Amino acid sequence: MNLNMHFKCLFIQSDGACMKLWGRDFGKAVVVGGLLLASALAAVDALAAKRDFEMNIEDTRITLVEKQQFHTFAYAGQVPGPLFYVDEGDEITVNVNNMTALPHTIHWHGMLQRGTWKNDGVPGVTQDAIKPGDSFTYKFIAEPSGTMWYHCHVNVNEHVTLRGMWGPFIVRPKKPTALEKTVTKEYVLMLSDWDSKWAAKPGFGGVPGDNYDYFTINGKSYPDTQPIRVKKGDVVRLRLIGAGDLVHSIHMHGHVSIIAFKDGFPLVNPIRGDTVLVGPGERYDVIFTADNPGRWMIHDHVDTHTMNGDRPMGGIMTTIEYDEIRNDENWYEWKGKKFTPNFYYEESLKKGPGIYTNDVFKGQAIQ
Amino acid sequence: MNLNMHFKCLFIQSDGACMKLWGRDFGKAVVVGGLLLASALAAVDALAAKRDFEMNIEDTRITLVEKQQFHTFAYAGQVPGPLFYVDEGDEITVNVNNMTALPHTIHWHGMLQRGTWKNDGVPGVTQDAIKPGDSFTYKFIAEPSGTMWYHCHVNVNEHVTLRGMWGPFIVRPKKPTALEKTVTKEYVLMLSDWDSKWAAKPGFGGVPGDNYDYFTINGKSYPDTQPIRVKKGDVVRLRLIGAGDLVHSIHMHGHVSIIAFKDGFPLVNPIRGDTVLVGPGERYDVIFTADNPGRWMIHDHVDTHTMNGDRPMGGIMTTIEYDEIRNDENWYEWKGKKFTPNFYYEESLKKGPGIYTNDVFKGQAIQ
Amino acid sequence: MNLNMHFKCLFIQSDGACMKLWGRDFGKAVVVGGLLLASALAAVDALAAKRDFEMNIEDTRITLVEKQQFHTFAYAGQVPGPLFYVDEGDEITVNVNNMTALPHTIHWHGMLQRGTWKNDGVPGVTQDAIKPGDSFTYKFIAEPSGTMWYHCHVNVNEHVTLRGMWGPFIVRPKKPTALEKTVTKEYVLMLSDWDSKWAAKPGFGGVPGDNYDYFTINGKSYPDTQPIRVKKGDVVRLRLIGAGDLVHSIHMHGHVSIIAFKDGFPLVNPIRGDTVLVGPGERYDVIFTADNPGRWMIHDHVDTHTMNGDRPMGGIMTTIEYDEIRNDENWYEWKGKKFTPNFYYEESLKKGPGIYTNDVFKGQAIQ
């Protein structure tokens, strides 16, 4: 789809999105792109206060697993959308260009929008939906801190559930808790459900009676997910985000899960367990100490969510691999698997605040 | 349906229900009805200890939204049923007259029924079901305090899920928590699910394979719900009640939700968040400070629960409107909406303990 | 099905399983079987540290309720499987013999498997699945304490959801909490869902679009469940285990439920309520004081989970009967019911640690 859009963009990235970034004091644009982006962002981190991003909504074909594709309306042409990793109090400006044939918005789920309610992204309530070919600029302060996300608020039954219109929005706190200060590695896991019968029918679907038959972490189903790689001694934070229509019951093997944050807020008394129920819209941050070298599953314990269509042992499932363990047993399904880093935005999150696109999640543009 | 019932009623209200009310010491009936009811109840509040109510179960046609009607077995001809707002320790007497063609009971969900187990309302376990044309008197002490509810316990899969046989039962505590003492406005939100194919088939439905396609707050779907109107500085309590068959994930925009009570009991450490998962039978009291003037959504984040049949943006959804904000933007869907107060029993709850019928929820009698 | 298996078993029980038990110091086999098992186990409790069990997986026909049967792959020919009630720190050895025609494993859900990750029971990740006719020995330390369970990890959508491949694994803590020390009676309730259309089709089912129509506690639906019998003054612990594919909302009448443990771990601040939402894989230990003689329901508040097929008032439902109350009212559905003890492993749990088979749960071998 080519709507022949015209909008001002100083720094066009390889993916067609437009990125601008200002440091707090010197107001100087930093041209960034690809791998350079990370270090650039890390470098200006301490100063960054204004974060400016330009994002297209694009008809995009993504692959859930193997041959199962889906027509999405993807933010910056990727599912999940770009990672917003910002500091509490940062001024966020996002100009959104709707390149699709249907109206959209962005709701910044969890952001308080103090004094900026018209930036809350609800069609018919806080703004008129962004029409095809139109743009809209959201401007707000990143508050409160924690694991947040963003998604379209138009026809959510289709656009959020079936069209991949969501991405992570992580706000680094001014005053981290003692527990989160110990974290050495962070991962974002967005959980979603899909009904394949609507895969090629944008503008339709997400109706009562739908039958979800694909289930994804960050838009991919096992075995097309990636392992979570840790080493002994790591303190790992999993940022679980319920981005779909169903409840997911995430079970981790071999470790004590500490449920430490709900919807971004620290629990006064974190809850220990091995399974955490994540409802639509909810976020839970689970922290565990990697003290048990081995190879472990983490998966949805809703058993039918570990399927790809009618084929068992897929869906919301991945492994935790320790560096200390060889993965060469013949029976390891992922023996010799090609590893693609940053599938959980773990590399981006190491680099500090910034707005990160991710080629891992790019789909194919649908003209 | 007219079963030509005969029962004793001293004070028949306009709606056909029969109400009696005694003060604690003088045992004198207070004749009440319509709007006078409220102030009368408020007046005797300090003394009231015995609360006596007569309630019919009636075949009643209610409208969920627009043209979607449903045949219910309504308590006092309304869905939800009358609000019981009583003090902890009050003696409750309810005489129930079954005017329908099917057996029913009332279970007072959450009431401990200490020493009164035969008033618990379970057919075949604590009583014989109330046959068509028969009556039954429930008598028990209101204990413990908190957000409770009542519902039929016969064929719950149909009568509770599809026939609207539920209402709120709020018990004011003798010793309120510090947090709840700060509350300035209270709202009851009962969440339910419906399958339209059974709308006109009383006695049938609520079976495995059913496909819920309507979703309601207090028996209505957006846009036939009402806004929650607050002013800056209010401390608002939402009493969420899972009255249906599904889990609902209630998300509020623009505010920090404090999940303060579960099933009526205060949490030792209230949980902050923006989304609360409400399972069938559960209640959560969410308290928030109205500190952010604007217009905000509150809705189910199960995306398909924001539909009316196959039409998006309906279901379990409403707005929070601040007095400080004009609602005249052309794009506000509810611009010029006629406001019907007391949709959340917010006016009744202001008046103090009493038993409140509500014309807002009245349906049409089915003869 | 007769695979004509050959394996070493010194002490074959009447049920075809093979049991061995060693005391801590003397390494002497204790021949146990049937009712003698219990006292034998209780006697060696203080010394027992190594617990050795041999368990077949067998094609077994069980009856959910009335005439509804189901083809399962049952551990030791029963659903739920044998109770493992062990002490924290015990060395567990289980030799599993797969007598069915499909591959299986056992995952010890909640066990940390410190240093023993290849005993975690995940096919393709920690081991090769146990092929038909093959055996596998699991060896691990019972850690941490609490309400755990075990289940197959092959094609969980079918094997766990539809084929009864699960059982309770209770680890007695070295340092019990003050609250659990007060407990006088304990009950295990494993919650499951079934789709009857797959009842006679082993190797198939558990796919998107399935329609669960039977719902069980410990493999049985009301009225084929058993009452929970208490006396005034008891402190009762219900160990709720989400063993199926759906979320269950367990509501208890007449008592304050204290949600005291999640996934085996004590909550710092137990949560009071009357309803607890149990997701797949989760466990909640609910403790209540039996201070209110009467006859009370405990049931799933997902209304359609109280059905047997299309017939209401079945499924996940039972009563709590007080010794102080006569059960002779004509309208009591279970008046004159034949009581079968140990349906909740309550008798086994009284006897202290041990590994308990249970004739209550035995099905018929399918040749």
Image (cartoon, coloured by chain):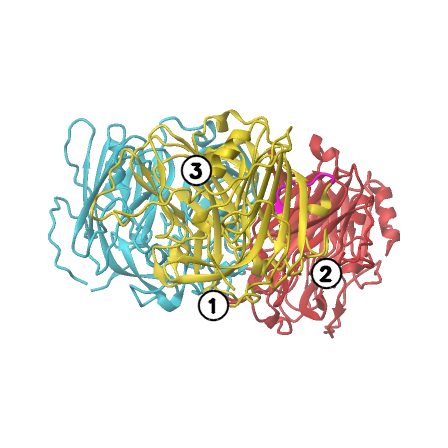
Chain colours: A red, B cyan, C yellow
Residue that carries the numbered disc 1 in the rendered image? C197
Name the magenta segment's main secondary structure: loop
Q: Is residue A114 visible?
A: no
Report whether A114 appears left or right of B260. Answer: right
- The magenta stretch is C108-115
Q: Nearer the viewer, residue C61 or A18?
A: C61
Q: Chain of mark 1?
A: C
Quick one: quadrant of the C terminus of chain A?
bottom right
Q: Nearer the viewer, residue B361 or C103?
A: C103
Q: Mark 1 packing: few (<14 Cα in 10 Å), some, or many (20+)?
A: few
Q: Are marks 3 and 1 on the same chain?
A: yes
Q: Specify the quadrant of the image occupied by residue C174.
A: top right
Residue C208 location, x and y as percent?
A: 56, 65
Q: Dot 1 lies on which element? A: helix
**In front: label 2 or label 1:** 1
User: What kind of residue is marked 1?
Assistant: Lys
Q: Specify the quadrant of the image occupied by residue B74.
A: bottom left
Q: Dot 2 lies on which element? A: loop
* Above or below for C66 versus A201: above
